């Protein structure tokens, strides 16, 4: 479904992404992980058209996207969320989600109806008339997700959708992400919450200092010496291995 080849981006003297390639299959949940400053969000920007690569290419569903504007990429079926959510604060939840729906739906009534459908899907059905500024952090995260889903994506790029949530809220969002995949939307997620990465992803790529240092299943990642050294640490890696063993992974 998605093929990114040898993507690179430099900002001044900073090599944010260096010759990174990934291949994503349809119907999967995959993860992009690594320490802060590794280049993960920059890589999402390269995939989704927000940042033009210095070199490399992006192909999605058989079409090259390299150089296309973000709205054109979104119209073709690849949508992203942002780590720092910025809803239209004075508008209602319903109106915020309708912004995404308007990508393919011209009529206001139809877009608002689509917004209501998506809101119920992500657990915001009882907050449709609430102004976005009055939502909790968890509510704003769900709103960001809903606005992306309203565009009707084939591929959803989630940039730390669990950041800032408490353990109970994380537990509630994990099955929501899985249900999105089950509805036919492929998911690639940037995430630091390793509980979610291990529970959800089938495959993971690890970035450090802009370079891809490892890829594989969650079990392989948790046992990779380079990943342990650059990101997980021995204590976290050991806890993840114990958790996977307990779950029969």
Image (cartoon, grey):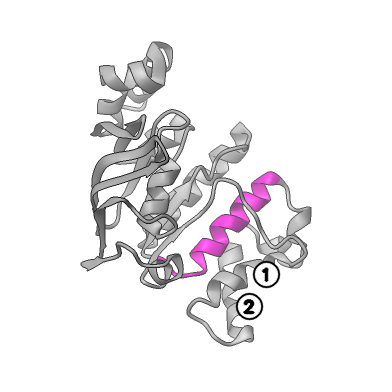
SS at mark 1?
helix
Q: Quadrant of the C terminus?
A: top left
In this picture, residue 39 sits left or right of residue 22: right
Q: Position of residue 110 (x, y in %)?
A: 58, 84
Question: Around disc 1, counting alpha carbons within 10 Å, would you say few (fewer than 14), some (14 to 19), or many (20 or more)?
Answer: many
In this picture, residue 223 sits left or right of residue 165: left
Q: Residue at x 68, y 71 (%)?
A: 95
Image label count = 2
Q: Residue furthest bottom?
A: 107
Q: Which residue is mark 2?
A: 112
Is residue 150 part of the magenta span, yes or no? yes
Q: Main secondary structure of the magenta part?
A: helix
Residues at circles 1 and 2 in contact by the CB criterion of under 8 Å: yes
Q: Which quadrant of the figure has residue 224?
A: top left
Q: Which residue is mark 1?
A: 94
Indicate whether 224 appears above or below 110. above
Q: Which quadrant of the figure has residue 13?
A: top left
SS at mark 2?
helix
Residue range corresponding to the magenta coloring:
137-153
Is residue 49 part of the magenta span, yes or no? no
Q: Position of residue 213 (x, y in %)?
A: 27, 29
Q: Position of residue 136 (x, y in %)?
A: 72, 47
Q: Residue at x 42, y 17 (%)?
A: 236
| Pointer 1 or 2: first along the chain | 1
In this picture, residue 67 sits left or right of residue 50: left
Question: Around disc 2, counting alpha carbons within 10 Å, would you say few (fewer than 14), some (14 to 19), or many (20 or more)?
Answer: many
Asked whether residue 240 is in view, the answer is no
Q: Residue at x 40, y 15 (%)?
A: 233
52 and 192: which is toward the camera: 52
Indicate whether 233 appears above or below 58. above
């Amino acid at each position: 479904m998605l093929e990114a080849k040898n993507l690179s981006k430099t900002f001044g003297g900073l090599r944010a992404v260096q010759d990174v390639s990934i291949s994503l299959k349809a119907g999967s949940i995959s993860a992009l992980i690594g320490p802060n400053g590794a280049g993960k969000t920059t890589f999402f920007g390269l995939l989704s058209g927000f940042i033009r690569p210095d070199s490399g290419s992006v192909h999605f569903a058989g079409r090259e996207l390299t150089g296309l504007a973000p709205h054109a990429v979104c119209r073709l079926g690849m949508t992203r969320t942002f780590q720092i959510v910025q809803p239209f604060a004075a508008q209602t939840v319903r109106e915020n989600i309708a912004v995404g729906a308007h990508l393919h739906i011209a009529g206001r009534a139809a877009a608002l109806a689509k917004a209501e459908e998506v809101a119920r899907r992500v657990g915001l059905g009882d907050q449709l008339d609430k102004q976005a500024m009055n939502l909790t952090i968890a509510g704003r995260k769900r709103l960001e997700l809903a606005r992306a889903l309203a565009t009707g994506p084939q591929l959803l790029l989630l940039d730390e959708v669990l950041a800032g949530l408490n353990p109970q809220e994380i537990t509630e969002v994990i099955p929501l992400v899985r249900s999105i995949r089950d509805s036919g939307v492929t998911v690639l997620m940037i995430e630091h919450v390793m509980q979610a990465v291990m529970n959800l992803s089938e495959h993971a790529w690890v970035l450090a200092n802009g370079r891809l240092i490892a890829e594989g299943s969650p079990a392989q990642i948790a046992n990779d010496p380079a990943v342990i050294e650059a990101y997980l640490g021995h204590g976290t890696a050991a806890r993840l291995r114990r958790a996977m063993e307990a779950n029969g992974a």
